[in-house]
Image (tube, rainbow, N blue to C red):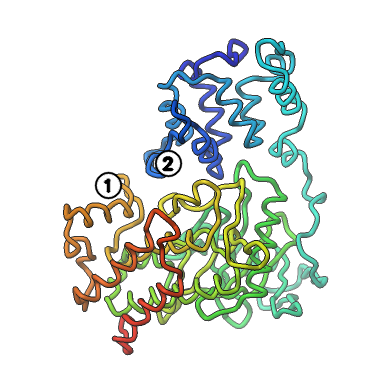
Amino acid sequence: MCDVTRDTPVRKLRFSALRALSDLLDPQHAWRSVATDIRGASGEPRYSQQHIRRFEAVVLQGKSPTMEMLFDWGTTDCTVGDLVEILLRHQLLAAVSVLLPDHSTCHASAGSSGASLSTLQCEAAERPSEACLQACMRPEMITKPVSRPVVMEPDSSSGPEENTWSTTEEGFYTFTHRELTVMTSGWDERPVKHGGCLLGAGGFGVVFRGSMCGGTDVAVKKLNPLDDSSLEDLKTQFNQEIQILRSLKHENLVSMVGFSGDGQHLCLVYEFMPGGSLLERLACADGASALSWLSRCCISAGAARGLQYLHHNNHIHRDVKSGNILLDEDFVPKISDFGLTRASANHSCSTVMTGRIVGTTAYMAPEALRGEITPKSDVFSFGVVLLEILSGLPPVDESRDPKLLMEMKDEIDDEELSLEDFIDGKMQGWRMEEVERMYDVASRCLCEKKNKRPTITEVLSELEDLHHKHPQSSR
């Protein structure tokens, strides 16, 4: 990289440099922050929400969104200096050091790079990165994330039927890592359908099925840090979810059973949801039968009820999606995964700004891509979930045109696709006037301008009206 200067065009960067940047910016979607900060010749943002989603979609092809973005931006004759300035604004210092290591940044002349930028680059080169700090941190140096009663470690004679877990004042069990190891059959990573314990994996961890003494099934989430996140980030995620589920309890929110903070991995233990996720159920995973219209009305109303409870208590979920809506044996929906949830400023359910863009792109509202956190962003995401409920289609499909489900709404509105052709052909018991009502709710949720979207209370009112038309909902 010694031949790279601030004046080097981005399009002339070597593949090795682009790959090194993608390794840093792809995890946790840091590239989104860069993309939303890129300006065109007019000074307006170069990339719209649709552009961002298209970059996101290349992941399904095994490609890097960072590299696709840089290939595109490189056609405008932008330079490494332009890119470095954006990276510095977002404190992506490790990426800066890939492009301009200390011998070409800290010792750069003020005449070629500017005094203020040179100073910033020197500081960036001298400060150890989060990844470096994380690699140097020993497990015994990690502070326990929450205060908890002392739980005696079982001795070697303890059998699987014995336990030493105790309860906190809030009614949560506190487990040792060894106990969770026994409960999950040694963290058996075979899928449950093949006799193992693996239920699934998400952005922040792997979920296993466990069995407590007495035969009670639970779901155990072992948290894992993403490539560009620190142990502090992981502890924040851990504490965040405990605090939320400690204070917020509702029939449509998943219940926490307990947690463990004494092993190499932080773990959260939840009630087991035998119906799986709504995403899996709509896909008829493992040969499951299709949900009826009546069940879909019930599920949509229940999920909206859980989201309304969060908003009423001044919390914004930030990652509403069908994969985070779990179903019990009676198909009662429960919202899960509260690690990204934020309490609104001053305990009012209003807008909050963040420098860290998180969430799932196929569900994200335009303002969420700019780091703006608002309850209306949850409403937008829920609109995508309603489209999934109506169609049975996944939110993004690389083989589909358009790839993003939310873009199919434009085809329906432009009469290029009929609503009757859009709805799930496997769904039984639907009536067009009711389908049209749910689609109308979804469309209003997906309005580009957040102030024109309904509140979740207004959404719930519409969906409950649909649900109450069928009090004896069937599967």
Residue 274 appears in the figure:
no
- Residue bearing mark 2: 52
Residue 233 position within the rendered picture, expressed as x and y whole percent measured from the top left: 68, 51
- Residue bearing mark 1: 402
Q: Is residue 307 above or below residue 129?
A: below
For this rendering, which residue is in front, 301 or 117?
A: 117
Per the model, the C-alpha gap separating discs 2 and 1 is 14 Å
Which quadrant of the rendered structure holds the C terminus?
bottom left
For this rendering, which residue is in front, 423 or 189?
A: 423
Q: Quadrant of residue 241?
A: bottom right
Residue 468 appears in the figure:
yes
Residue at screen point 49% across, 74% down = 334
- Mark drawn on residue 292: none
Q: Is residue 287 above or below residue 370?
A: below
Of callouts 2 and 1, which one flags the residue occurring earlier in the amino acid sequence?
A: 2
Residue 239 position within the rendered picture, expressed as x and y whole percent measured from the top left: 70, 62
Q: Is residue 357 left or right of residue 67?
A: right
Q: Is residue 129 left or right of residue 302?
A: right
Q: For the residue labelled by badge 2, is the local secondary structure a helix, a strand or a loop?
A: helix
Residue 267 position within the rendered picture, expressed as x and y whole percent measured from the top left: 65, 62
Look at label 1 and name its amino acid: Pro
Look at label 2 and name its amino acid: Ile
Q: For the residue labelled by badge 1, is the local secondary structure a helix, a strand or a loop?
A: loop
Residue 450 position within the rendered picture, expressed as x and y whole percent measured from the top left: 44, 58
For this rendering, which residue is in front, 159 or 372?
A: 372
Q: Is residue 172 above or below residue 222?
A: below
Residue at screen point 36% across, 55% down = 395
Q: Is residue 180 left or right of residue 443?
A: right
